[in-house]
Image (tube, coloured by chain):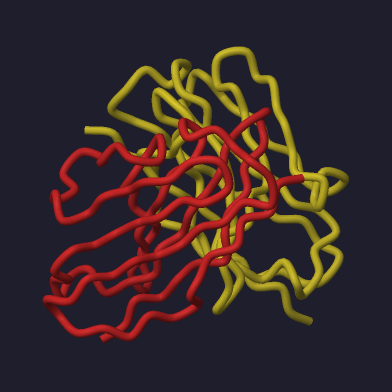
Chain colours: A red, B yellow
């Protein structure tokens, strides 16, 4: 079973700064199966990045995803106040889904 | 527009069962699988299982496979998640989510809080 480890657990930054979030898999996975979602308090998650690097509909270009093998990264350049939230990575393959523990981006 | 609307808050006693519904609209119900995840207070997301809304095939996580049943009603465009033998650790917000045209989830229900307490 693949385990996803997200780091850091919490990222304390200011608006305008750059955020770099990590998602590490316990074994090599294929990029098409990795995605990122954003969750604000009291709301369901919202898709941000799919297939490791493709932005979902309506997601601003300050969000980007990269990575391969075991290491994947979500980068937010120039944090906007609306970007402060929890970010989850997930892997979906073989009819099973695994989520990472999440990274909270706080002001 | 695509919408997933879930049933309301539930409060159950340990040992009971709960059945949460997820009504889909705005697209061809049979063309996208529906998954269920849950989120315990202050915790991350835990995948529970999915259903192929076309043929009804299901797959469950090992953790809950002996207690969960996911079903669908194609006429009503609704997916159900039933969890039995509830315990306090099952207290969580339960979400349904639609599988997109790839290995990701593009629409989510609003969430259903299930509280298990004696």
Q: Position of residue A56 (x, y in %)?
A: 26, 40
Question: Quick check: A23 left or right of A49?
Answer: right
- Determine whether, in the image, residue A98 is placed left or right of residue B117: left
Q: Residue at x 52, y 27 (%)?
A: B33
Q: Residue at x 63, y 41 (%)?
A: A28
Query: Residue at the spot x=48%, y=75% of the render?
Result: A8
Position above or below: A31 against B18 = above
The image position of residue B24, as x and y in percent, is 40, 33
Quadrant placement of the N terminus of chain B: top left
Residue B94 x %, y %? 56, 57
Q: Identify the residue at horizontal 36%, vertical 74% (top origin).
A: A41
Q: Nearer the viewer, residue A26 or B4?
A: A26
Q: Nearer the viewer, residue B52 or B112?
A: B52
User: Where is residue A87, by image quadrant?
Assistant: bottom left
Tally the numbered discs: 0
Where is residue A37 shown, x and y percent of the image?
38, 53
Above or below residue B101? Residue A102 is: below
Q: Residue furthest top?
A: B55
> Residue B31 vs residue A81: left or right?
right
State the residue in front, A72 or B97: A72
């Amino acid at each position: 079973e693949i385990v996803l480890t997200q780091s850091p657990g919490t990222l304390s930054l200011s608006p305008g700064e750059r955020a770099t979030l990590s998602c590490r898999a316990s074994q090599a996975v294929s990029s098409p199966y990795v995605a990122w979602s954003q969750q604000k308090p009291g709301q369901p998650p919202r898709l941000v990045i799919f297939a490791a690097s493709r932005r979902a509909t309506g997601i601003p270009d300050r969000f980007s995803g990269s990575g391969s093998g075991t290491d994947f990264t979500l980068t937010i350049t120039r944090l906007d106040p609306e970007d402060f939230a929890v970010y989850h990575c997930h892997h979906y393959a073989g009819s099973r889904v695994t989520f990472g523990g999440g990274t909270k981006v706080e002001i | 527009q695509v919408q997933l609307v879930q049933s309301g808050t539930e409060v159950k006693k340990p040992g009971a069962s709960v059945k949460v519904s997820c009504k889909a609209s705005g697209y061809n119900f049979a063309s996208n699988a529906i998954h269920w995840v849950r989120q315990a207070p202050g915790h991350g997301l835990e995948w529970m299982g999915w259903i192929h809304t076309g043929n009804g095939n299901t797959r469950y996580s090992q953790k809950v496979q002996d207690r969960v049943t996911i079903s669908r009603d194609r006429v009503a465009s609704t997916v159900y998640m039933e969890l039995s033998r509830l315990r306090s650790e099952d207290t969580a917000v339960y979400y349904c989510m639609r599988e997109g045209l790839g290995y990701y989830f593009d629409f989510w229900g609003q969430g259903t809080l299930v509280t298990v307490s004696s």
